[in-house]
Image: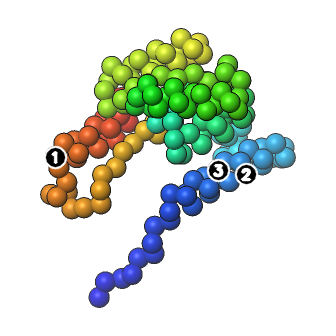
Amino acid sequence: MAQHAEPLPSKKWLFENFIQHTQAVFLDIDDKLNFTSNQIYWLEVSMMKSIVITGSTRGIGYAMAKAFIERDCRVMINGRSDESTQGTLVTLSEQFPSEHFSGAAGDVSNFESVQNIWEESLRAFGRIDIWINNAGISHEQAPPWLIPIDELQSVIKTNILGELYG
């Protein structure tokens, strides 16, 4: 007899809880002098200024970028295309001073593209304190033999090679 699994949380629920958790961690740091190891880690993150977040033009990557910018960090925004990256920069410029962020379009499944993101980040900020490999893609939920091979290869290149290149 098959066991009934709980349904997976929605993207909206994950996003909202991620933001709440991130804000709670930073609030804990501001309000306490006794730090746990997790709080010390977040304190160090908030003191570091230059952060690269791949896949930061939307979703959780975008939320992380905004959270770091709000905490006076400099963030390199990355999207796969110039259009998505520039669009996000325009949106952020309506909310924050432009010295807190820059953008470098690039596909993380391509090593030269990742190297360009690195170089653009160094050019913009002078150093990189944190690199967050957030970029990822998925495919339609189906058995692997029903998914077109080019789609599978794209997922593997982005999600595995992109992680290694970063």
Above or below, 148 relative to 115? below
| Left or right of 138 in this view: 118 | right
Mark 1 or 2: the one toward you? 1
Q: CA distance from mark 2 to mark 3?
A: 8 Å
| Residue that carries the numbered disc 1 in the rendered image | 149
Dot 1 or dot 2, earlier in sequence: 2
Residue 119 position, x and y percent, is: 46, 14
Relative side of 103 to 109, left or right: right
Q: Secondary structure at mark 3?
A: helix
Image quarter of residue 156: top left
Q: Quadrant of residue 142?
A: bottom left
Please name the residue that numbered disc 3 is placed on.
19
Q: Position of residue 35 (x, y in %)?
A: 76, 45
- Position of the N terminus, as image quadrant, is bottom left
Direction bottom: furthest residue: 1
Mark 1 or mark 3: name the one nearer the start of the chain: 3
Label placed on residue 24: 2
For the C terminus, which image quadrant? top left
Q: Earlier in the sequence, mark 2 or mark 3?
A: 3
Rounded to the nearest angstrom, the CA distance separating label 1 from label 2 is 43 Å
Q: Which amino acid type is marked by label 2?
A: Ala
Vertical placement of 140 versus 111: above or below?
Answer: below
Name the one closer to the observer, 146 or 117.
Answer: 146
Q: Where 160 sits versus 16, above or below?
A: above
* Camera-side residue of 73 and 140: 140
Specify the color scheme.
Answer: rainbow
Dot 1: element: helix
| Residue 47 visible in rendering | no
